[in-house]
Amino acid sequence: GGLLVARVERGWFIYTGYSWFRQLPAGVPGAYRLFANMISLGQMPR
């Protein structure tokens, strides 16, 4: 899998090749950390 993050106009575009539907229910700690970081991306100062 992979992760692609790009700044687009006033927002962000995030593409992941990860299997979130498997990782999150399985309780994988790294998946939760990465998911939380993606959610908080818009809150980061420029």
Image (tube, rainbow, N blue to C red):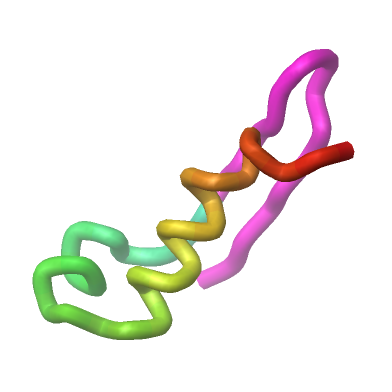
Identified at 64% across, 35% down, the residue is 42
Frontmost residue, 45 versus 3: 45
Q: Is residue 44 left or right of residue 9?
A: left
* Outermost residue to the right: 46
Magenta stretch: includes residue 46? no
Frontmost residue, 18 versus 40: 40
* Outermost residue to the top: 9
User: Residue 45: image x %, image y %?
Assistant: 81, 40
Q: Is residue 23 left or right of residue 32?
A: left
The magenta segment: 1-15
Identified at 52% across, 54% down, the residue is 16
Q: Is residue 28 left or right of residue 40?
A: left
Frontmost residue, 28 versus 40: 40
Identified at 37% across, 73% down, the residue is 31
Image quadrant in which you'd find residue 25: bottom left
Q: Is residue 38 left or right of residue 36?
A: right
* Outermost residue to the left: 25
User: Residue 8: image x %, image y %?
Assistant: 80, 23
- Picture layout, residue 38 above or below residue 17: above
Identified at 54% across, 46% down, the residue is 40
Overall secondary structure of the magenta stretch?
Answer: strand
Magenta stretch: includes residue 10? yes
Image quadrant in which you'd find residue 6: top right
User: Residue 21: image x %, image y %?
Assistant: 19, 59
**For the C terminus, which image quadrant?**
top right
User: Residue 41: image x %, image y %?
Assistant: 63, 44
